[in-house]
């Protein structure tokens, strides 16, 4: 006679993750690890499974999983049931997966009060990576699926989300979710910190005051999106606010309006504004000397070199082994892109950072009314443990441009300074790109007059 | 007062196009006999020396010295709107600082106006270079060699060595080489006082040669080692010369 099975018990999964967390004092000792409460998943073959947060096998200077987990657990404990109510910073999200059918929705933390800092990258410069992860993780995201070209069909959720995106202050928001947010926590080194997400059933918002300028642009259905973006920027609306409203399809000619995935809208706004300022700068006189601006933040060093020459721009990024975009263990990866006097029409292969950096430098050049050839050199070190978003590039370069410049009379002196600040030999930067070498080797016709 | 008339726009448009690849804003110096433009690109790497005699136009009226500063790219956009079989009249309206472009066909007229800019104050002199070698070559042939080079590199070496004229490029992806022997079909003339070679940025050369092919069939290139190249593109009427500064140590 066989044995009688009294009860089937599911095999516990990923025991090591629990060990890892219970062993870490930052996680708090009172955590409840029942399967029902939280699921943790690691991708197969992940080095995290071997490392368990202790050996830093990924090459970073601290464990990104641990950094995210602390915030993740905290926010999780604050959500009871399927209702989330709190002040939205304001914040909205438009996904890009499945375009043109994308997930959109509002983001709000589960608490009231002034939460505006949670989604204002303009104010994040100088905050630690833990604080930034915390900001990002606090925001609960309600989701509903919408066709980007037919937003009017999505009903009240979309209307209210759009209202949020036009607000100029934090807004009390109530979200009724269809189910509790997914409990899984991805144990992976290179995941952007995001808060809990769940499908949205309905939402209510409290008193709201729209930004006057954005309201004007929103109701003007003959005002194209690009000029509207420029006008709002001129009026002093922060770029991240313009990006939110832009992503909700609040601007543009009426029949062409559509939702724009958040990621794309960030780059679209960076590009529209940067391109416009580049056009303006062509009317300004050249700078007189070689100038260098520097900034280092969140494991990213930025060196901005301005050369007295007609407008053109080249950006470089060097990723150390083990940093987010370079999983290789032995080689530094350099990515680069450039544009000449007449700009570019193809999307820069290195992505949104190209445009964010350009915007930050152009803000400076249009302010001082000067023209220059611009180089941005970025080194990302192993203490940049998590990708936090392109705002980091924008704010880091803006910070560099706020510093007093280092002024040099010759290119050689300026390059020597760059070399002293960068750990990768300049020769390797030049091999990777075009414009820097070009600047050194190209003679001018004026040398022969 | 300046006014010209043309029965066909295409040759003139091709010339404006050839200017537009180098010049952003340029000042035409116009007198009774001709219109002239001497200008550099915004980076001061290339220079164009352009001259068009009054005979080029069907009707040419100019009183005294005239300076006409235009955004060449914008000018080209307007000129592009003119149809081949239209009669064109281009006129400088000094009072309103406008350039007026009249097109006429049958009883239908169209009229464009574009802004005339403030004259640029920096008068540029011609570069003074003693060239050691020169090659007279078919523009098409030169263009092909330059397009070959774009496959492999961003720079191109132009060289006269003995009785051979060479255009070559080397890069990570491989290399490309064109050689013309003296007295070959495409190389019409080769004068060598001294061997010469210099390297240039391909994008400039490519832009220039691509735009000029429509206007000119034969080019005379003059070279000196590590000095600017002079490219004289022969026109039925007028003058079109480019200077391009070299790259050192690429």
Image: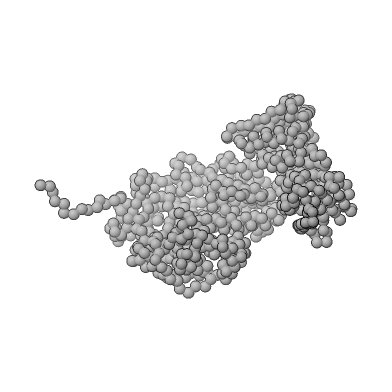
> Residue B163: where, in percent of width, then height?
74, 25
| Horizontal side of residue A17 vs B157, given as left or right | left
- Residue in view at x 87 percent, y 52 percent: B62
Q: How many labels does the image show?
A: 0
Residue most extreme to the bottom = A207
Image quarter in which the C terminus of chain B is found: top right
Q: Is residue A423 visible?
A: no
> Residue A61: where, in percent of width, then height?
43, 49
| Horizontal side of residue B20 vs A300, given as left or right | right
Q: Is residue B75 visible?
A: yes
Image quarter in which the N terminus of chain B is found: bottom right
**Residue A176 to residue B44: above or below:** below
Which one is nearer the viewer's eye here, A336 or B35? B35
> Residue B142: where, in percent of width, then height?
71, 34
Which one is nearer the viewer's eye here, B152 or B131? B152
Residue most extreme to the front = B106
- Residue in view at x 71 percent, y 56 percent: A283
- Residue in view at x 76 percent, y 38 percent: B216
- Residue in view at x 46 percent, y 52 percent: A387
Q: In which quarter of the image is residue A254?
A: bottom right
| Horizontal side of residue B238 vs A359, given as left or right | right
> Residue A415: where, in percent of width, then height?
62, 45
Residue most extreme to the left = A1
Q: Quadrant of residue B125?
A: top right
């Amino acid at each position: 006679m066989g044995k009688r099975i009294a009860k089937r018990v599911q095999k516990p999964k990923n025991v090591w993750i629990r060990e890892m967390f219970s062993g870490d004092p930052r996680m708090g000792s009172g955590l409840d690890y029942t399967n029902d409460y939280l699921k943790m998943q690691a991708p197969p073959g992940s080095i995290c499974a071997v490392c368990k947060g202790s050996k830093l096998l990924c090459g970073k200077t601290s464990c990104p999983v641990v950094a995210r987990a602390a915030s993740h657990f905290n926010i999780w404990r604050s959500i009871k049931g399927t209702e989330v109510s709190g002040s939205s910073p304001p914040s909205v999200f438009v996904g890009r997966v499945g375009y043109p059918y994308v997930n959109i929705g509002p983001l709000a933390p589960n608490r009231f009060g002034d939460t505006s800092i949670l989604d204002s990258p303009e104010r994040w410069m100088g905050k630690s990576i833990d604080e930034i992860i915390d900001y990002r993780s606090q925001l609960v995201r309600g989701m509903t699926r919408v066709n980007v070209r037919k937003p009017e069909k999505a009903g009240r959720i979309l209307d209210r989300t759009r209202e949020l995106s036009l607000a100029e202050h934090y807004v009390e928001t109530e979200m009724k979710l269809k189910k509790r947010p997914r409990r899984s926590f991805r144990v992976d080194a290179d995941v952007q910190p995001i808060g809990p997400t769940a499908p949205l059933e309905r939402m209510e918002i409290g008193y709201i005051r729209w930004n006057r300028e954005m309201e004007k642009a929103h109701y003007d259905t003959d005002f194209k999106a690009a000029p509207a973006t420029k006008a709002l920027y001129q009026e002093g609306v922060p770029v991240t606010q313009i990006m939110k409203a832009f992503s909700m399809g609040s601007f543009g000619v009426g029949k062409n309006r559509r939702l724009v995935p958040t990621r794309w809208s960030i780059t679209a706004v960076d590009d529209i504004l940067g391109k416009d300022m580049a056009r303006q700068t062509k009317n300004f006189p050249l700078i007189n000397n070689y100038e260098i601006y520097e900034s280092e933040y969140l494991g990213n060093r930025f060196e901005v070199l301005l050369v007295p020459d007609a407008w053109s721009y080249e950006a470089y990024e060097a990723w150390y082994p083990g940093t987010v975009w370079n999983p290789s263990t032995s080689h530094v990866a350099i990515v680069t892109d450039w544009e000449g006097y007449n700009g570019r029409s193809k999307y820069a292969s290195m992505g949104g950072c190209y445009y964010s950096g350009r915007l930050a430098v152009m803000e400076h050049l249009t302010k001082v009314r000067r023209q220059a050839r611009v180089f941005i050199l970025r080194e990302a070190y192993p203490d940049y443990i998590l990708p936090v978003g392109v705002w980091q590039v924008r704010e880091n370069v803006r910070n560099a441009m706020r510093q007093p410049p280092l002024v040099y009379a010759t290119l050689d002196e300026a390059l020597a300074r760059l070399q002293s600040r960068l750990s990768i030999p300049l020769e390797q930067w030049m091999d990777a790109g075009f414009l820097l070498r070009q600047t050194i080797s190209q003679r001018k016709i004026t040398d022969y007059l | 007062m300046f006014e010209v008339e043309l029965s066909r726009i295409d040759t003139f448009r091709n010339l404006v196009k050839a200017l537009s690849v180098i010049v952003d804003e340029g000042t035409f110096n116009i007198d009774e006999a001709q219109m002239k433009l001497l200008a550099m690109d915004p980076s001061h790497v290339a220079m164009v020396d352009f001259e068009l005699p009054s005979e080029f136009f069907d009707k040419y009226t100019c009183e005294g010295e005239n300076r006409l500063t235009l955004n060449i790219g914008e000018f080209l956009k307007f000129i592009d709107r003119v149809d081949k079989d239209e009669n064109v009249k281009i006129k400088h309206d000094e009072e309103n600082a406008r350039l007026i472009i009249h097109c006429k066909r049958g009883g239908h007229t169209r009229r464009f106006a574009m802004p005339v800019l403030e004259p640029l104050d920096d008068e540029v002199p011609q570069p003074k270079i003693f060239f050691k070698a020169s090659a007279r070559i078919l523009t098409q042939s030169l263009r092909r060699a330059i397009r070959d080079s774009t496959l492999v590199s961003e720079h191109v070496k132009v060289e006269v060595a003995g009785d051979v004229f060479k255009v070559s490029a080397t890069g990570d992806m491989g290399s490309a080489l064109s050689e013309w022997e003296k007295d070959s079909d495409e190389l019409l003339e080769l004068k060598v006082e001294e061997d010469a070679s210099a390297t240039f940025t391909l994008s400039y050369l490519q832009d220039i040669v691509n735009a000029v092919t429509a206007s000119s069939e034969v080019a005379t290139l003059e070279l000196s080692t590590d000095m600017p190249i002079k490219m004289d593109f022969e026109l039925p009427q007028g003058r079109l010369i480019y200077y391009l500064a070299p790259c050192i140590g690429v």
